[in-house]
Amino acid sequence: MSEYAVLGKRLPRVDGPVKAAGTARFTDDLSLPGMLYGKILRSPHAHARIVRIDTTRAENHPGVRAVIVGEDFGDYRYGLRADTRDEYPLARGKVRYLGEEVAAVAAVDEETALEALNLIQVEYEVLSAVTDPEEALREGAPQLHDDKPGNISVHMKTSFGDVDDAFRQADYIREDRFYSQSVLHGFLEPNAALALWEAPNRITIWASKQSPYFLYRNLSNCFNVPLSNVRLIQPYIGGGFGGKNGGYPVDFCAVMLSKKTGRPVKIVLTMEEVLSSHRRRHPMIVRLKTGVKKDGTILAHDCRIIADGGAGTGVGPSTIANAFYFLNLPYVVPNVRYEAFRVYTNRPISVAQRGNGIQQIRYAADVQLEMIAHDLGLDPVQIRQKNAVYTGYRTASGMNIHSCGLQETITEAVKAAEWETHYRPWQEKEKEPLGRIATGVGIACNSFQSGARLTGHNCCTAVIKVHEDGTASLLTGSTDSGQGSETVLAMIVAEVLGTRLEDVFVPQTDSTVTPVDPGSFGSRVSSTAGNAVLIAAQDARSQLLPVAAELLKAAPEDIEFRDRKVLVRGAPDRVLRFRDLTRQTVAWGSGTSIIGQGSWGQTVPPMNFETGEGDASGAYSFGTQAAWVEVDTQTGKVTVPRMVVAHDLGFALNPLAVEGQHEGSIAGGVGHTIYEHCVEENGQNLTPNLTAYGLPTVYDLPEEMVSLSIETIDPVGAFGAKESGEGTQVSTIPAIVNAIHNAIGVWITDLPVTPEKVLKALRDRKAQDRATEGGQP
Amino acid sequence: MLDQLIHLKVNGTLHTVAVPPHRTLLEVLREQLGYTGTKRACRVGDCGACTVIIDGKAVLSCLTLAVEVQEKEILTIEALGDGDRPDTLQQSFVDCGAVQCGFCTPGMVMSAKALLDENPHPDREEVRRAIAGNLCRCTGYAKIVEAIEDAATRLS
Amino acid sequence: MRLKKFEHFEPRTLSEACQLLNEHGSKASVIAGGTDLVVRMKYGVTTPECLINLKKVDGLSAISSVGENLHLGALATLTQVRCSELVQERYPILAEAALAVGAAQLQNMGTIGGNICLEPRCWYFQQGNSWRQARPNCFKNGGAVCYMAKGSKRCYALYCGDTAAALLALGAKVRLVSLGGERTVPVEEFFVDDGMRHTNLRPGELLAEVILPGPGTGQRGTYLKYRKRGALDFPIVGVAAVINKGATAASRLRIAVTGVGSSPSLVVPPADFPAGTGLTHEMIDRMAEIARKQVKPVSHMEVSPGYRKELVGVLVRDALEKLAGA
Ligand SMILES: Cc1cc2nc3c(=O)[nH]c(=O)nc-3n(C[C@H](O)[C@H](O)[C@H](O)COP(=O)(O)OP(=O)(O)OC[C@H]3O[C@@H](n4cnc5c(N)ncnc54)[C@H](O)[C@@H]3O)c2cc1C
Ligand code: FES
Ligand code: FES
């Protein structure tokens, strides 16, 4: 891609130096004169009626400035859609999970605020709780929300093609149950907010948000102030992964406490609060029935999901729809039936997490495909090649594939993994005695939406102000929570204007300054915001062009912007410095400002959450992952020393950033597969610290990670780019689980892959083998 | 428990601050002295984000009492380069893509610095060991290990 | 996650420390590296009114050779211990165990004394205030139940110190001092299998030093640790094994386990365990089996008793095979 001067280069991220220097300010690093410290009181019960809250003693405690409870927010509820608003800033009437926010305090320091929490007296009438989604669906189960009978938060039922007939045609059918556990986002910066209310109705808030404009709308509604008066300034964000999207009680409480006290209020959660009661990934039970032809061609999927939604809906409808969409990709599935229940339980609320519903479904589908290959004696690579979707393919449900390098990713991943050397089918290995350390390789494919199509506000907007010295400011509401989008978007500006990366400054999101944006989720930024930036940059360029043409005495179409210069094609002597052009342009005629603007949103029709028909996005990424595992056959411990990722990301805008995304995806995926798990008892998390929870250390992740980019130049994404930060995590789980089977011949259908489970599965298999042998004449 | 006037030598500067014994070094650095480069994540020793160097050793400031580190040389991330002039180690982190969200970075850099100050030519295992107490969710660590090795090469 | 108020003392001598301990009795806690104590204080499960900080006690971190023996001051950090040439030369198993603790920062801060005295752990014990309010307190938090072994009359919190196993296997002693005097006891007598009170440290007593007996010639040992993650985690099972070539049959082989009960424990070879010859595969298998049978773990922190026993067997076998092969 040498035609680009800036894009496609391994450029270090622009915010790297300040982050490495420790001068990058995160929310907790900020303070204001007169600032108070807020703390939140949480429910000790998984399900209870709040009979009475007495805050008098807390209010009278020296140093306490305000105490608030649910009633202070009136009837305000929030949620993704009008019919799913079931979350409160502070509990009203009832608490629905252990750790739910009940009251909040602002005091002169954190210690005093903590003391005050102990002085708030809450009388509860304990209700029976339900923490298992299957039980929650049973008749007579405790009900969480009066207006949602049967504890059903989201129900989706749909079908395309003739599934029953397909199963009749099938040569082989398998039905399996898979379970994916409760895992957390694991960001290191706890949620935090610093709020300042200025009477009569202005809000300024610094909050750790990957999608700040959710909160901007939430605050406007909650406090009944116009959007113009909500100023959300985004400090640096210490990771989000889906857990810092919307408004949360921490934000609402900070504002309300500031409103009550007239002082700035900062609330920083402890890691314990984050891990025990903040949002997490949906645990899911996936029952999948698949029919294939003898040669492994998939004929149909019939899938039933029970997703544990916790006590609120959050972005649940999108999770459930996503799981359906990606039942249809990355393999050709001509007939598909799907029914999903997202169920309320007395647990913390499940939301999106890097992959939003897709990890769980692809774990099931790709492991089951491997089972089928094994049962039918087919080659795992070939069965994937045979079923892989291709450019021009349209899923049964109507998703359109405009660019697809899936086959190439399979080829490249297999090559890089030296598959031919390392892979031997289990049938062959089975005959040999298992050594102490058994090794295996596994492969899995993925697909992901490249910029989710949203209902409602769907587009990203960019404003580029070109300064007279030739530098530019890019105003965007698409935040960088660590993924590096700020750098990539700045590179697009530099590319179009023919300047350098260091000439572009991207201030952090500030809702009074930067344009409104849906947020950094659903792999939207590089592709969707990228297009908006491209349009805005072209707009700015077009404002410069007439002046350049005039100054250089050339036709506008002959003019090129490159390396801080303005050139005339074919006339090397006619050159202008870019900064001279900008200086001349602002003074041209009666004067002007160069401000480029661009908006872009996915143009496919919005997704249909009811039927799942149509596209989830205008473009889809594809990829293949190959995992190498080692299993200690005596302790059951699994390690993943090596992982290969080959990803069709359309175009690698910045290969260094892409590698970072791939490696980070693997990290989260390995954690989900092997290490991480909230151990709970009656809705109480027994593992609310990073050690008990088991966030992977440097010793637990692949020492060797190979990241390969397959460029297919997508017609929709900016410069042909598609996503690369979520799709790769989708195939991490099945690649590892398939590799474990290849190593020791057992299928792990229940995550995480704890050593104890592995050992038990190994024992069971051996016992079964013996029984079969013994039974033979 | 009255506040005590204590003297803390941070990055070569002597600070006199009044603190009660129950303040951790992390709290005093961030809240009283303004060294917010040192991050606060778990507060109980699980993550390494708060790592500083005391008398040449990487330690956790969230588990250190401020009153017990008087007369010691305390180094925080601010002792290294700033955003304009990163030192070699910081530059390696930036160049190798070892920084994503950056929240683990100051602690990670301090662990790496303690290692390289003591052992300028660490092998791979020594590098991994030095940062095993620092959690990072974003990077998967490979680029961090690479950055530290890169810095070791550049420094020698 | 803020520490409660306390008074802070920094004695300069051991006797001053003992004096203070005597004065303040049960209201005081001794702090060394603080990596265990401060965490418990942050969670609010230990709430001392005063801290007696050992860091300034003169000479308490010395590592010195006394005759055959090696003396480790209680305040020597794990990094000091593992980097000590004397330790590396004579008791490499102890360096191995110290290196297995937590991670670099914890080894730089944590002391050998604190590592030995490390409080037993349990998911139902080390939790924050609001977590604990959600259920009746367990024994260790002043209540009357053990959630690990419901119905039991005792606390089953797990002792998870790494170096204790190595010290047990090495036949180390600890010197305990108090205002009234001092005593030296073998490590195996120092520990008590009780999650509530896992050492027999008497009120007013301090651990002053660890005394390692001379290794003699031909002593070999190894410490193997099994944990969930490759760093930071406490042992699910730790096994230390030491073989003394020249010694009598009874003390030829010492195996200790940690992470399995409320105290580290020695695995006792049966009286007829063959001695005098090298370790054969049969002997190793038999010893692994004995170890597996001797430990009596309860279900703990997501590890079933059966699996933990299994691991003890595997680690004992691995350790002995390593020693046999060395
Ligand atoms: C994330 C994390 C991971 C960890 N992983 C491990 C691990 O893998 N293995 C492991 O063994 N430990 C681990 N630890 C615990 C701890 O860091 C070590 O055990 C350390 O060695 C404790 O020593 P210390 O000096 O810091 O103890 P302190 O916290 O100072 O003291 C511990 C206890 O011993 C008492 N005490 C200390 N010194 C004396 C003395 N001289 N006389 C009498 N009583 C005394 C104290 O009163 C206190 O009750 C971990 C800790 C954390 C936070
Ligand atoms: S904040 Fe100190 S270790 Fe996490
Ligand atoms: S860069 Fe985000 S936690 Fe390490």
Image: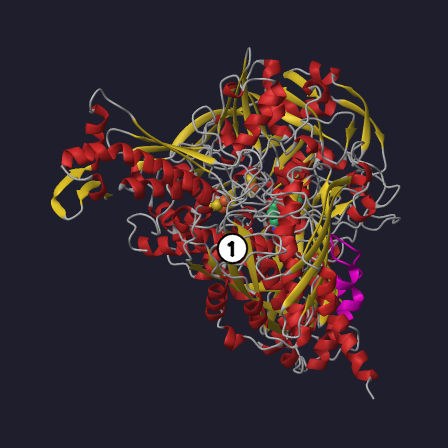
> In the rendered image, is residue C67 in sight?
no
Measured from the top left, where is residue A565 in percent x and y?
A: 20, 41
Q: Residue furthest bottom?
A: A777
Residue C294 painted magenta: yes
Q: How is the image coloured?
A: secondary structure
Please state, as top left, top right, bottom left or bottom right, where the C terminus of chain C lies in the image.
bottom right
Q: Residue furthest left?
A: A573
Measured from the top left, where is residue A74 in percent x and y?
A: 70, 19
Q: What is the chain identity of the residue bearing mark 1?
A: A
Q: Is residue C127 left or right of residue A476?
A: right
Residue A497, placed above or below residue A663: above
Q: Nearer the viewer, residue A373 or C312?
A: A373
The magenta stretch spans which residues? C290-310
Amino acid type at image mark 1: Ile
Q: Residue at x 55, y 26 (%)?
A: A216
Q: Residue at x 14, y 37 (%)?
A: A552
Q: Residue at x 72, y 35 (%)?
A: A99
